[in-house]
Image (cartoon, rainbow, N blue to C red):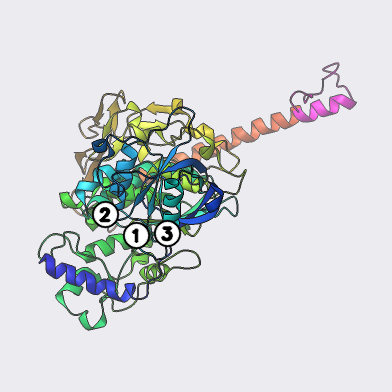
Amino acid sequence: MKHQFLCFLLLLSIPFLCESRFVVEKNSLSVTSPDSIKGAHDCAIGNFGIPQYGGSMAGTVVYPQENQKSCKEFSDFSISFKSQPGALPTFLLVDRGDCFFALKVWNAQKAGASAVLVADNVDEPLITMDTPEEDAASAKYIENITIPSALVTKGFGEKLKKAISGGDMVNLNLDWREAVPHPDARVEYELWTNSNDECGVKCDMLMEFVKDFKGAAQILEKGGYTQFRPHYITWYCPHAFTLSRQCKSQCINKGRYCAPDPEQDFSSGYDGKDVVVENLRQLCVFKVANETGKPWVWWDYVTDFQIRCPMKEKKYNKECADSVIKSLGIDSRKLDKCMGDPNADSDNPVLKEEQDAQVGKGSRGDVTILPTLVVNNRQYRGKLEKGAVLKALCSGFEETTEPAICLSTEVESNECLGNNGGCWQDKSANITACKQAGQGDARSTMEDVGMKREIDMRSLLDKDSVKCECPPGFKGDGFKKCEDINECKEKKACQCPECSCKNTWGSYECSCSGDLLYMRDHDTCISKTGSQVRSAWAAVWLIMLSLGLAAGGAYLVYKYRLRQYMDSEIRAIMAQYMPLDSQPEVPNHVNDERA
């Protein structure tokens, strides 16, 4: 069955790969000594570790006498590359071959190297050094790689080795300042992602990144500093196979939009079409939220869906998604309209646009792997980690226009996201008592804060602004305990004679007997046909009449007080020119201090 899946995956990929155009992201390398090789050279940024986007690094190149491919630990050879106090950092030059690029860099990092240059072993254009595909054994060390790395051509590598063997000290600078364009005061970036949470190490890494980066992303978006857009990769099934069982289970819209089977098994679990539908839903969440001026709600939906609707718990479905959508106040009717009919034999405008966007434009190559981050139309290379990505985004701002979040030495965009602020939380329901000052609970952080570019962003990073307060529907100290309020038992809701109350976690459900409809705002039952429960309508009209009378009375009081205030203002103004009999003199009521 797995062989059948791989064949089908290849079938989906061939039409796209035949037309693909790959772009290698480069940074500048300049040799400062010796004079024989002095000058600028290109190198390809490794797709792991943390490149110093926006910065540069100077160091001395070392080529080891043993373990030259860096496939073994240097400690086995009693070799260390740790820089002595006052000395330049060590850039380790190693040869390509025999093991993964990432393993070479990891062994060099453990030995004390500050950066790694991998010399190609064949004459070819520069390529991007990537991580091993779905290798669980290497996942642990890959996520711990923190030094930058780059691939250099075979010819340049041989020049470096010759200079070192000749006794020359080889000094060079690695420069990432132009790796990301920085044309203006706003950075545009996009994340190519996937809703599938059962695709192994890379999916786990992607989900963790989205959760960790959510707070920083929302701050930047709210402040108008960035323009973000999510994207999702889909493939199409060749026309000759659209009626096959594989295409039917992995595709929607008659084979136009497909995704691989999550479990790589056609006979069990979720199908690829389930992933395509959820991807489409997440795209439409962004589209609908963006139309209402709140594009950052996408981050709330995706993180909530990830926590509440995982595949392994068999909750990856429309019902669970609808509960998340409802909790975030997203218009479900607009969402359904955006998604369209997945069974229709026609194009879906949203997914068609995504397939068109996969094709590279300008300096950006085709998107063929997940996840892919693009900043100012340049593909990001390096570890998909909050600090590294934020550094790349900040390098994309025009000089002197960076927001305060980029200037902070220790960025912590939302204490509630990091350690939950030390407050109570229910991870299974994604509910927390942690709140940022002036904001709602952490699940909807930043949603109701109308930030402008002029706001001092540092105030949003204030760690003292965190407080613990049980969310609505709960009671307790907010730190160690928050208990569900039983609205039914405590008679706080659903108390009308025809009502039937059922307590739920953090809320309640109220239903009416017979052919009656519950009105939550008025805590009463009314007839669906209008022929019953006239007393309920009378009560509603009585309430509305009372509110009308109260509003009328308040308006009369307001008019009276406004008249008195205006009279006093006029008297004050006139007293400056014609003192009244009742008072000898009234001083000017607006002085320089108040003005």
C-alpha separation, residue under disc 1 versus residue under disc 2 = 19 Å
- Which amino acid type corresponds to the residue marked 2 in the rendered image? Pro
Element carrying mark 2: loop
Q: Residues within 10 Å of mark 2 (few under 14, many from 20)?
A: some
Residue at 70% in and 33% down: 563
Residue at 18 percent across and 48 percent down: it is 513
The range drawn in magenta is: 569-595
Magenta-colored stretch includes residue 590:
yes
The reply to whether discs 1 and 2 touch (Cβ–Cβ < 8 Å) is no
In the picture, the quarter occupied by the C terminus is top right
Q: Position of residue 570 (x, y in %)?
A: 79, 30
Distance of label 3 from label 1 (alpha carbons)? 8 Å
Task: Say which residue label 3 marks.
Answer: 153
In the rendered structure, find residue 121 and report the number of the disc placed on it: 1
Q: Earlier in the sequence, mark 2 or mark 3?
A: 2
Q: Tag 3: Cα neighbours inside 10 Å, few (<14), some, or many (≥20)?
A: many
Few, some or many residues within 10 Å of mark 1 (<14, 14–19, 20+): some
Q: Which residue is mark 2?
A: 132
Which x, y percent locates residue 295?
45, 53
Residue 32 magenta-highlighted: no
